[in-house]
Image (cartoon, rainbow, N blue to C red):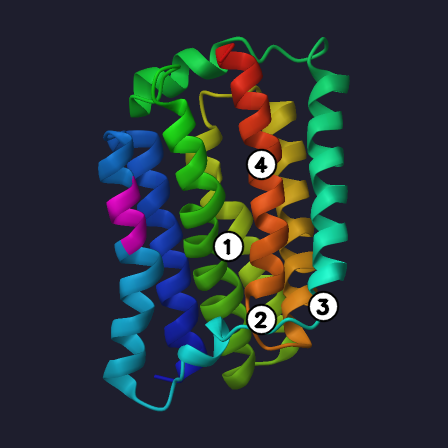
């Protein structure tokens, strides 16, 4: 089987498994985070070692070039995400979000600060390593550029479906999925020229800073 197909299968299966965990099994946040680490970090590493010739180290090598551009993108994303919430908070009901989050994952007002730190720095790295590093930069080496762009961006949006079910109504979910797909394309574009995930990781951090800010507002921390 060709490597592009193998990588595609690993990416889709990982997203489906995590959706099932989020929407059906609904374990505690720690268990869910451990499973994500296995699927998004360990699985690509084991695959790379098994087939040989797939260097994952180069996608995490530091590269200072482009950091200012990524920083400005990050600020823009923070403003857009937080602004969208402030605009739509009186149109869509977000009140059930914290209740569902506590019920399904055990995240609550008392532990949200630590969860927010994890989401901002560690979780964002896992997702960037998997979607931009493995599913885009590495896939682009063995598949067409268009295929890598579309698959990684589609998978990035697909992965978030399970966690949004029960949190938001259908209109918000659809808007979010479109935003995630477009965001995936932008993240890919940032990383493509440098061949490393550091730029998209920085922007992703700011996106998570924005969602965490919304979380602090909803939890009234």
Badge 3 or badge 2: first in the primary sequence = 3
On screen, residue 135 above or below 144: above
Residue 179 occupies quadrant: top right
Disc 4 from disc 3: Cα separation: 20 Å
For residue 209, which numbered disc appears in the image? 4
Q: Quadrant of residue 163?
A: top left
Q: N-terminal of the two: label 1 or label 4? A: 1
Which residue position holds label 1? 155
Q: CA distance from mark 3 to mark 1?
A: 25 Å
Residue indicated by mark 3: 66
**Residue 58 rendering spot, x and y as whole percentages:** 47, 80
**Quick check: 70 above or below 217?**
below
Where does the image place residue 27, in percent across and percent down from the top left? 23, 31
- Mark number, residue 148: 2
Asked whether 49 or 113 is in front, the reply is 113
Where's the N terminus, which quadrant? bottom left
Q: CA distance from mark 2 to mark 1?
A: 11 Å
Q: Which residues are magenta?
A: 33-37
* Helix, strand or loop for the magenta stretch, by majority: helix
The alpha-carbon separation of the residues under discs 3 and 2 comes to: 22 Å
């Amino acid at each position: 089987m060709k490597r592009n197909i193998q990588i595609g299968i690993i990416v889709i299966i990982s997203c489906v498994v995590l959706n099932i965990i989020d929407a059906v099994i609904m374990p505690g946040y720690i268990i869910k985070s451990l499973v994500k680490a296995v699927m998004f970090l360990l699985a690509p590493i084991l695959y790379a070692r098994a087939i040989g010739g797939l260097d994952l180290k180069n996608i995490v090598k530091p590269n200072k070039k482009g950091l200012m551009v990524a920083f400005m993108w990050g600020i823009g994303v923070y403003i857009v995400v937080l602004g969208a919430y402030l605009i739509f908070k009186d149109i869509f009901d977000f009140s059930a979000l914290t209740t569902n989050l506590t019920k399904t994952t055990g995240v609550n007002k008392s532990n949200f600060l630590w969860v927010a730190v994890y989401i901002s720095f560690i979780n964002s790295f896992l997702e960037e390593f998997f979607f931009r590093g493995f599913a885009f930069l590495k896939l682009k080496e063995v598949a067409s550029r268009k295929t890598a762009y579309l698959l990684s961006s589609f998978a990035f949006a697909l992965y978030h479906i399970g966690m949004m079910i029960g949190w938001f109504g259908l209109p918000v979910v659809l808007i979010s999925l479109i935003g995630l797909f477009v965001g995936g394309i932008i993240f890919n574009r940032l990383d493509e020229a440098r061949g490393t995930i550091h730029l998209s990781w920085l922007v992703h951090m700011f996106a998570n800073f924005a969602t965490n800010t919304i979380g602090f507002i909803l939890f009234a921390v």
